Image (spheres, rainbow, N blue to C red):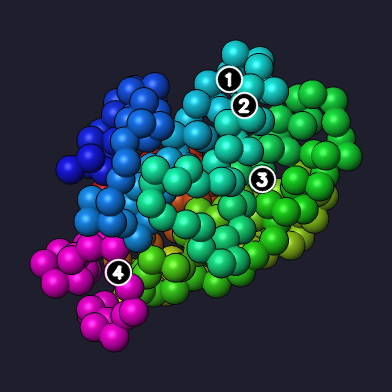
Amino acid sequence: MTAELLNLWHLTGQADKAADILATRKFHPWEGGEGKITSQFILNQLLRAWQHLDAREPQQASELLHAALHYPENLSEGRLPGQTDNDIWFWQAICANAQGDETEATRCLRLAATGDRTINIHSYYNDQPVDYLFWQGMALRLLGEQHTAQQLFSEMKQWAQEMAKTSIEADFFAVSQPDLLSLYGDLQQQHKEKCLMVAMLASAGLGRLRNMNLLALN
């Protein structure tokens, strides 16, 4: 329930209320576990960092982003091995650039551009979030690697188009899944939503987001 409350506060622009809970509550695995609380923690740090960037306060934004790389003990969950945090490093680069530190901005962009560039049809706890690919591509663009970025976004678009035609079934051999959606949820609808998200991220990277407005309404 707390994970859902945090999500609602974030959706309604009340990141400060969510931050209070994340800072003071001692969470337990049965409250969500396997990424549900930690993903809300990262989102909270990002949302508040963006607020500081909008207010032209890059140093404060950078501090929040740095904190997002280290989970507090009260979340009762550690970071996954190999976690690349592409979104955090991309925005750290923006903060560094806003402070006139081009060397640090380049370092952060190179970190944001690293990581796996594949998308799995099934979504498990230890999978790389698909939006990480978008931030990889955006970092590559700012590094001047336009061709590589274009290729990445095109591959995302192709994956979404091909996988949208695929029927999906529950993988009961999964070592870990974040909830019981494999048993009670509409897997095909979830798969459709994932394909739509990948398609929209690809179109945003390719500069064609306006063409996706009708698709988003679906």
Residue that mark 4 sits on: 177
Where residue 158 is drawn, which disc sits there? none
Query: Element type at marker 1?
Result: helix
Q: Residue furthest left?
A: 184
In the rendered image, residue 54, in percent from the top left (x then y), is placed at 58, 18
Q: Nearer the viewer, residue 191 or 14?
A: 14
In magenta segment, residue 167 = no
Please give the name of the residue rendered at 20% of the width and 71% of the height, measured from the top-left corner. Answer: 182
Whether residue 47 is visible here, answered yes or no, is yes
Query: Element type at marker 3?
Result: helix
Query: For the residue carrying disc 1, how many other residues have a C-alpha within 10 Å: few (<14), some (14-19), or many (20+)?
Result: some
Query: Element type at marker 2?
Result: helix
Where residue 89 is drawn, which disc sits there? 3
Q: Residue furthest top?
A: 55
Q: Amino acid at mark 1?
A: His
Q: Tell me whether the residue at label 1 lies in contact with that at label 2, contact meaning CB atoms closer than 8 angstroms.
A: yes
Residue that mark 1 sits on: 52
In magenta segment, residue 170 = yes
Q: Amino acid at mark 2?
A: Ala
In the rendered image, residue 133, in percent from the top left (x then y), is placed at 57, 58
Q: What span is in magenta?
A: 168-190
Main secondary-structure element of the magenta-colored stretch? loop
Image-quadrant location for residue 179? bottom left
Q: Residue furthest right?
A: 103
**Cα–Cα span, label 3 and label 2:** 12 Å
Q: Nearer the viewer, residue 196 or 97?
A: 97
Residue that mark 2 sits on: 61
**Cα–Cα span, label 1 and label 4:** 34 Å
In the rendered image, residue 201, in percent from the top left (x then y), is placed at 50, 51
**Cα–Cα span, label 3 and label 1:** 16 Å
Q: Tell me whether the residue at label 3 lies in contact with that at label 1, contact meaning CB atoms closer than 8 angstroms.
A: no
